Image (spheres, grey):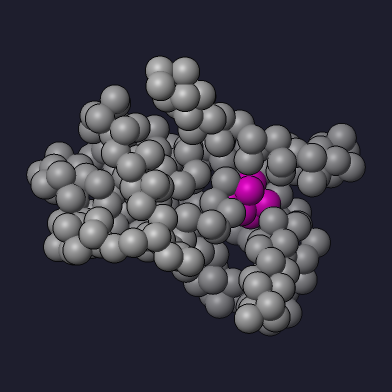
C-alpha cells in the first residue's frame, strides 16, 4: 500500500512542477494524450467524490506556466479544461440526484468523509445557487457542490448556467494567471512558495467558515 501512496504523491508533484509536467507531456504523454490526462484530472476533481485530493488550482496554474513556455496551446488547453470541468460538474450533479441518500448513509472511509459533504452543505445553504460559482475557487467544496445540488433536487436547467459560469471563470482565471506570471523571474525562483500561497488562498474560505463555526459553538 505504501508504494501506491508514494506513486500518487509523485504523480501529484509532477502535475504541479513545470519542469516535470513539461517532461511528461513531451515524452510519455505527447500530443493529445497530454491534454486528455489534464482533462481527466479536472473531470475527476469536479465530477467524482473521490477527486477532492487532486491539485486543481495548483495544476491549472502550472498548466498556464507550461503553456507560457510554449509546450501547450493555451487556447486549446483552456477550452478542453472548461469542457471537462462542466462535464465533471454535471456528472457530480446526476450522481447526487440518483445516489445521494445512499452515499449520505455511508460511514467514513479512506476515500469518503461525510464531513466534506456537510461542509459543502453549509456553504451551499449560506450562498444558494451562487455556491456553484464560488465553489470552483474552493478546494473540496468544488468537488461536492454539484453533488449537493443534485441531492437537493436543484433543477438542472437552473444548475447548468451557474456551473458554466463557475467552470469558465475558474479555468480561465487560474490558468491565465500562470500563463502571465509563469515567466516572471521572481515567480520561477520561488515557484513552490507560489503554489503553497495559491493553495492557502483557495482554502481560506473554508478556514474562515470553520473558525466562525467554532466560535458560534
Residue 97 screen position, x and y as percent:
15, 57
Most foreground residue, 135 or 39: 135
Residue at 77% from the left image edge and 66% from the top image edge: 20
* Quadrant where the image shows the C terminus: top left
Residue 188 screen position, x and y as percent:
84, 44
Q: Is residue 87 visible?
A: no
Furthest-top residue in view? 216
Most foreground residue, 30 or 190: 190
Residue 39 screen position, x and y as percent:
48, 64
Q: Is residue 101 visible?
A: yes
Residue at 46% from the left image edge and 47% from the top image edge: 140
Instruction: Judge whether 84 appears above or below 27 on screen.
Output: above
What predominant SS class does the magenta segment belong to?
Answer: helix
Q: Which residues are magenta?
A: 58-63
Residue 85 screen position, x and y as percent:
39, 54
Left/right of residue 167 with respect to residue 38 in the rendered view: left
Place residue 54 in its image quadrant: bottom right
Most foreground residue, 33 or 128: 128
Place residue 213 in its image quadrant: top left
Left/right of residue 3 with respect to residue 102 in the rendered view: right
Query: Does the magenta run of residues contain 144?
Result: no
Instruction: Judge whether 6 appears above or below 211 on screen.
Output: below
Residue at 68% from the left image edge and 78% from the top image edge: 2
Residue at 29% from the left image edge and 39% from the top image edge: 121
Amino acid at each position: 500500500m505504501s508504494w501506491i501512496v508514494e506513486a500518487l504523491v509523485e504523480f501529484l508533484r509532477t502535475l504541479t512542477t513545470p519542469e516535470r509536467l513539461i517532461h511528461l507531456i513531451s515524452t510519455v504523454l505527447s500530443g493529445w494524450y497530454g491534454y486528455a490526462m489534464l482533462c481527466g484530472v479536472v473531470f475527476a476533481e469536479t465530477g467524482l467524490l473521490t477527486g477532492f485530493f487532486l491539485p486543481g488550482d495548483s495544476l491549472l496554474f502550472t498548466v498556464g506556466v507550461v503553456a507560457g513556455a510554449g509546450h501547450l496551446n493555451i487556447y486549446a488547453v483552456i477550452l478542453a479544461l472548461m469542457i471537462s470541468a462542466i462535464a465533471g460538474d454535471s456528472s457530480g450533479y446526476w450522481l447526487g440526484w440518483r445516489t445521494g441518500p445512499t452515499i449520505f448513509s455511508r460511514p467514513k472511509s479512506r476515500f469518503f468523509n461525510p464531513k466534506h459533504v456537510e461542509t459543502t452543505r453549509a456553504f451551499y445553504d449560506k450562498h444558494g445557487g451562487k455556491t456553484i460559482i464560488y465553489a470552483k475557487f474552493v478546494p473540496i467544496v468544488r468537488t461536492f457542490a454539484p453533488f449537493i445540488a443534485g441531492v437537493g433536487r436543484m433543477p438542472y436547467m437552473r444548475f447548468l448556467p451557474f456551473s458554466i459560469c463557475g467552470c469558465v471563470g475558474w479555468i480561465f482565471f487560474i490558468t491565465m494567471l500562470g500563463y502571465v506570471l509563469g515567466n516572471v523571474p521572481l515567480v520561477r525562483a520561488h515557484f513552490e512558495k507560489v503554489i503553497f500561497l495559491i493553495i492557502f488562498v483557495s482554502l481560506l474560505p473554508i478556514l474562515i467558515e470553520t473558525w466562525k463555526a467554532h466560535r458560534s459553538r
